[in-house]
Amino acid sequence: MFAEYNDYVLNSSRQLGWITEDQEKSTRYALDSLPGASAISYLEEQQILTAVQCEQFRKTIQDSIESQRSNAPEKESSSQSHSPTTLHVNQYLDYGIQKGASDIHLSPFAKPTMRHSGGLQFIDEFPTLSPSDTEALAYGFLDQEQINSVHENGSVEFSYHLPGKTRFRTSVVRQRRGWEIVFRIINPKIKTMDELGLPEELKILTQYHNGLVLVTGSVGSGKSTTLAAMVEEINRERSDHIITLEDPIEYVFEAKKCQISQREVGTHTHSFASSLRAALREDPDVIMVGEMRDLETISLAITASETGHLVLGTLHTSTAARTLDRLLDVFPIEQQAQIRTMVSESIRGIVCQQLVPRADGNGRELALEVMFNNPAVANVIRDSKTFMLPGIMQTGRKQGMRLMDDSLKHLLEQGKITINEAMIRCENQKTFMI
């Protein structure tokens, strides 16, 4: 099919006078050495055709694909159903949902891949994808604005909804080999804090009416799931106005006792900072900030937490001490003394988490580091002595505080994780040496 489209593009370009005979021959020669490559992408990358000319071809080809889909018989043969040129991304996503995957990767010159229990696995039921396959798959579900974003910026990120199934955090990028698509599968059901196995003490963090609560961890550590569970706890137990600022919207909340407003960065607002500034004028009680990624957003979040709002946010840090250092280090030196004082008064708690593969290979276990604010914690924040936090947290176990190493050690003693997994994730390996 795509060989025909490549012929159409080259023949039409020659007939329209957009390329010369020599350019057509050299392009065909280049495409012969790049199996599955798209003539449109090649001509655009080599600046032989303009972006407008390429877009005209893409629109014509997309119309042709849609026409073929609408005229195709409802039941296809088994050989057709596993051909990339007849598939829609929804079929890969359906497969991932059935297998309990957390992510689906569709990359050029590679088999479709899924992440399961933290590791990547090839999906052998589907054939290897070519650059033309992944580009066609992207065109099959992106709208025109999203397609334009990929061409202009090289990527687009958004939330994709599979009707009757679930939502996906979606990223489409152009890379050296072609178009690449990655989906993060979002559980349609928002789990409660109890269902996630979160400590009972963490519910205290959802009962404050002001202050700053941070959930931290690496990408894929379950921060969004924990944050959603905390918001849902507030939604069920309080009568407040909750505003969520996300990029993109992942979990969709249904109002219970609270009024909930969800805004998506890039769709409903330009940035976290601008949406947070606007949120302060919308009479909120609770504000969830999907990612505190820059000075302006962090500054506004701290200000909001001081002025009578409970602010829940995330950072990509691994321990409570590093979280506080990251929070403070974004500010200029001359402001840090003042900010340390503000944070020491406004911080309510920090939850750092990791998802560790189980010893039996069946799923992952949640390891947590938990810090609550108390006079000792506030003092080390003000005095810029966050290196003393681990000691304070060890003595604060009765309050529900715990270190990541203690959580990993507990899971290891229960036989839920292996010593190797504990060793590569811990802060102090001596804790695990026998």
Image (spheres, grey):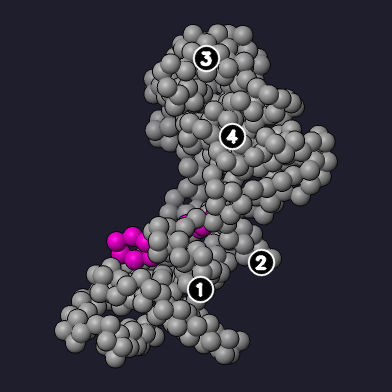
Task: Name the amino acid, label 3.
Answer: Gln
Q: Nearer the viewer, residue 353 or 246?
A: 246
User: Could you tell me residue 59's position as x and y percent?
Assistant: 46, 79
Residue pointed to by mark 2:
163
User: Could you tell me residue 36's position as x and y percent?
Assistant: 32, 76
Cα gap from disc 1 to disc 4, whole angstroms: 34 Å
Residue pointed to by mark 1:
140
**Looking at the rendered structure, which numbered label has been put on residue 338?**
3
User: Could you tell me residue 42's position as x and y percent?
Assistant: 28, 72
Q: Nearer the viewer, mark 1 or mark 2?
A: 1
Residue at the image point whose x is 39% and y is 80% from the top: 57
Query: Magenta stretch containing residue 9, yes or no?
Result: no
Q: Magenta stretch: dominant SS?
A: strand
Task: Name the amino acid, label 1.
Answer: Gly
Residue pointed to by mark 4:
313
CB of mark 1 within 8 Å of CB of mark 2? no
Task: Name the amino acid, label 4.
Answer: Gly
Q: Tag 4: Cα neighbours inside 10 Å, few (<14), some, or many (≥20)?
A: many
Q: Nearer the viewer, mark 4 or mark 3?
A: 3
Cα gap from disc 4 to disc 3, whole angstroms: 21 Å
- Residue 74 shown left or right of residue 3 in the figure: right
Cα gap from disc 3 to disc 1, whole angstroms: 52 Å
